[in-house]
Amino acid sequence: MSRAAAGAGQRLPSIGPMTAAEHRNNGGTDTRQAIVEATERLLDTTTLSELNVAAILTESGISRATFYAYFTSKYGPVAALLEQTMDAIYDSVSAFTARHDDRDGPAALDEGLEGAARLFRHHRMVLPAVVEHWHEVPELRTLWLGVMDRFTEAFAAQIDRERAA
């Protein structure tokens, strides 16, 4: 399997760092995502405190220079993973928060929360890693507080719509 063909959760083969030509051919999207996915795999067995860039490099099969072309620290891919995870969870709960029809509110809430729970289980290690470090890492703090605001505003707006109805 070529690196460009790897994606959607498939593990990249350990064949050494990617070449500059491989990075140009995939436009960087696959490379960035490979780093994020490698970080998530490592968080299954390593705490964020113990995680280091060298382990991410080994797991993703990319060079140090390539890593730093996308991220400034080990927290970068964690932040990207949190953003992707929370976007998916937000989309899931939008069954309730973006409801403008006559669907049953409790049923829509149940549907959204069940989907969110599935996503939490799938990405179970990113959330504790962020919660453990958001107060000391500005990049994670900004993202985490933004995520909390986004969810709070969406639920509050839906509650206001229901009260007005």
Image (cartoon, helix red, strand yellow):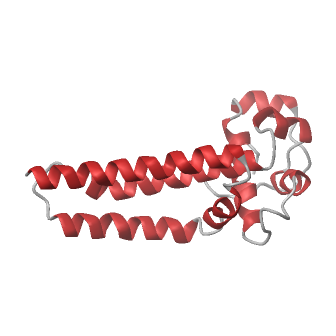
Residue 48 on image: x %, y %: 77, 62
Depicted 113 relative to depicted 61: above or below: below
Q: Which one is nearer the viewer's eye here, 22 or 120?
A: 120
Q: Which one is nearer the viewer's eye here, 105 or 136?
A: 136
**Residue sitting at the far front:** 135
Q: Is residue 58 left or right of residue 24?
A: right
Depicted 125 relative to depicted 39: above or below: below
Q: Quadrant of residue 72?
A: top right
Residue 26 on image: x %, y %: 70, 33
Q: Is residue 7 visible?
A: no
Q: Quadrant of residue 9?
A: bottom right
The residue shown at (56%, 68%) is 122
Residue 40 on image: x %, y %: 70, 60
The residue shown at (66%, 36%) is 29
Q: Which one is nearer the viewer's eye here, 91 or 37?
A: 91
Q: Is residue 55 left or right of residue 39?
A: right
